[in-house]
Image: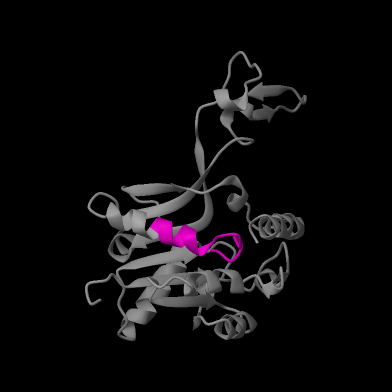
Amino acid sequence: MDNQPRVLCVIPARGGSKSVPKKNLKNFCGKPLVAWPIEVAKSCAFITTVVCSSDDEEILITAKKFGAEVRTRPAHLATDEAASPPVVLDVIDTLEKEGAYFDYVFMLEATSPLTESSDLSDAFFLLLSKSDTFDSLVSVSQSISGHPDFTFTVSQDFSLTSINQLDWRVKRRQDISQLYFIEGSLYLSKISSLKASASFVQKNTIGFEVPREKSFEIDDEIDFYILEAIMKYRRNTHG
């Protein structure tokens, strides 16, 4: 057991959402949104510690209630402009000052509540098996509706111009090139390489594909209804 890597999971959950006030505390299928990634991470035996970082006292209390350790996020990392990797690095720094050291770190977003423990397990053991070559992993999903072959600019006179085809024609979905976007549900990195790059997308990063339905995230009020419908469909289909 002593040779097992120590794995940290950090869940950033800022209190200042503008699109949906108190978004991370809003009910989603019976639980606060922030509870979903906490419970998923806690269910994974290979994850050593789960920490929620927030600037909001109510979020911290709720996260602790659902089993996470909590750390208060500094004000300069709680602005609209603040990126997530510095938040994770802040948690790592705080824990190391407390004497807790880890080898790998997950970052999970509360706004992606459809992530399952199997996703974390598959991602972790994939990176672990390729750790001689790769240092990090990010979840991706195939780009279809946003594919460049289907994307246009609109000029001031309202005319369309394809950004990817000089002589635009309709393409079937199976005929477009396979492109992927970073969909944001999970990130994983060796802590040493995250410290060196301050990013989860590094020189040697694995793209971990997740199905389309898991790529949806909650940004606006309507997204709650969309993802709740997907969750209910999943429960009705898989039990």
Q: Is residue 62 left or right of residue 75?
A: right
* 183 or 71: nearer the viewer: 183
* 228 or 236: nearer the viewer: 236
Indicate yes or no whether the magenta region holds residue 122: yes
Residue lying at 60% horizontally and 86% vertically, measured from the top left: 61
Residue lying at 25% horizontally and 49% vertically, measured from the top left: 133
Q: Is residue 120 left or right of residue 104?
A: right
* 148 or 131: nearer the viewer: 131
Residue lying at 45% horizontally and 76% vertically, measured from the top left: 50
Q: Quadrant of residue 59?
A: bottom right
In the image, is residue 68 above or below residue 79?
A: below
- Which quadrant, please, contains the C terminus? bottom right
The colour scheme of the drawn protein is: one colour
Q: Position of residue 216 (x, y in %)?
A: 63, 52
Question: Can the viewer see residue 179?
Answer: yes
- Boundaries of the magenta span: 109-123
Indicate yes or no whether the magenta region holds residue 226: no
Question: In this figure, what is the number of numbered marks?
Answer: 0
Q: Position of residue 199 (x, y in %)?
A: 39, 57
* 144 or 30: nearer the viewer: 30
In the image, is residue 129 above or below residue 157?
A: below
- Which quadrant, please, contains the N terminus? bottom left
Residue lying at 37% horizontally and 74% vertically, measured from the top left: 92
In the image, is residue 223 above or below residue 58?
A: above
Question: Can the viewer see residue 14?
Answer: no
Q: Position of residue 20 (x, y in %)?
A: 73, 65
Q: Position of residue 130 (x, y in %)?
A: 28, 51
Q: Is residue 174 left or right of residue 152?
A: left
- Identity of the residue furthest to the top in this view: 167
Q: Quadrant of residue 189?
A: bottom left
